[in-house]
Image (cartoon, coloured by chain):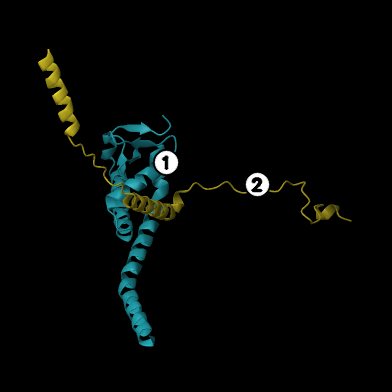
Chain colours: A cyan, B yellow
């Protein structure tokens, strides 16, 4: 009985040692993504207020009008945000044994629900509509 | 006429002999429950991750100047 308990504890300890570095690495990656997205957030809010970018039903941001694509700084910001989001969706999907697309879809629903009335949202039919319209 | 009636009666009698089976597919509840649980967990995780997105809450109201704060509110120069 005592021997069985010891073996169980050793197995649990080894499993913990084996799994812990992976989990810690994921936490670190998530924290880095959070810091990066938090820093970018005020600029995104301003661009949403200006009507230049909006949330899409796929869980990413896009330029509301193609004309804005000439602005390289704006393009770079959108690209960086979407890269971070993709990385985040992959981490969360791994944690919950699901797909990044599923996580992205949940985030899209969350973003649509939390959007302000002035924000442009791209719906499943591909049309941009203002939240408050 | 009589022949038609006999044929009709025979057709009715044969129709009663047919066997109809309706298969009801079992309703699976477990996968739906699992999906809801996963969705809830993902939503919670996303809310925690993006908690910096929440609008800044209004500052708590400042106590009115006339409210007795327990200290002497008379300016020092007017105090005897």
Q: Position of residue A76 (x, y in %)?
A: 29, 48
Residue in view at x 16 percent, y 22 percent: B9
Q: Which disc, if any, is residue A82? A: none
Vertical relation: B5 (above or below) B52: above
Q: Quadrant of the N terminus of chain B?
A: top left
Q: Nearer the viewer, residue B73 or B39?
A: B39
CB atoms of marks 2 and 1 within 8 Å: no
Expressed as whole percent of the image width and height from the top left, the position of residue A89 reads 31, 54
Mark 2 falls on what kind of element?
loop
Q: CA distance from mark 2 to mark 1?
A: 29 Å
Q: In the image, is residue B74 above or below residue B23?
A: below
* Residue A87 coordinates in the image, percent (x, y): 29, 56
Secondary structure beneath label 1: helix
Of the pair B64 and A3, the residue shown nearer to us: A3
Which residue sits at x=37%, y=50%?
A: B36
Q: Quadrant of the C terminus of chain B?
A: bottom right
What is the number of callouts on the image? Answer: 2
- List the single residue furthest toward the front: B2
| Mark 1 belongs to chain | A
Percent position of residue A34, x then y: 39, 57
Tag on residue A113?
1
Same subunit, tags 2 and 1: no
Q: Residue furthest bottom?
A: A3
On the question of residue B29 being in view, the answer is: yes
Residue corresponding to mark 2: B61
Question: What chain does badge 2 belong to?
Answer: B
User: Which residue: 49% across, 46% down?
Assistant: B55
Q: Residue at x 12, y 15 (%)?
A: B2
Observer able to see residue A39: no
Q: Residues within 10 Å of mark 1 (few under 14, many from 20)?
A: few
Is A49 displayed left or right of B2 in the figure? Answer: right
Q: Nearer the viewer, residue B9 or A31?
A: B9
């Amino acid at each position: 009985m005592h021997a069985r308990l010891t073996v169980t504890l050793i197995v649990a300890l080894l499993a913990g040692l084996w799994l812990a570095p992976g989990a810690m690495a994921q936490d670190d990656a998530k924290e880095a993504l959070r810091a990066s997205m938090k820093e970018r957030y005020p600029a995104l809010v301003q661009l949403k207020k200006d009507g230049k970018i909006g949330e899409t039903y796929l869980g990413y941001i896009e330029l509301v009008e193609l004309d804005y694509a000439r602005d390289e700084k704006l393009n770079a910001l959108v690209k960086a945000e979407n890269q971070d989001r993709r990385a985040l969706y992959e981490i969360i999907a791994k944690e919950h044994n699901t797909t990044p697309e599923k996580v992205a879809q949940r985030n899209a629903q969350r973003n649509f629900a939390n959007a302000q009335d002035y924000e442009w949202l791209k719906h499943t039919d591909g049309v941009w509509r203002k939240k408050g319209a | 006429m009589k022949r038609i009636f006999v044929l009709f009666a025979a057709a009715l009698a044969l129709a009663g002999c047919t066997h109809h089976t309706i298969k009801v597919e079992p309703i699976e509840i477990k996968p739906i429950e699992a999906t809801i649980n996963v969705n809830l967990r993902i939503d919670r995780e996303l809310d925690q991750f993006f908690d910096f997105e929440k609008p800044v809450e209004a500052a708590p109201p400042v106590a009115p100047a006339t409210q007795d704060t327990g200290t002497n509110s008379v300016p020092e120069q007017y105090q005897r």
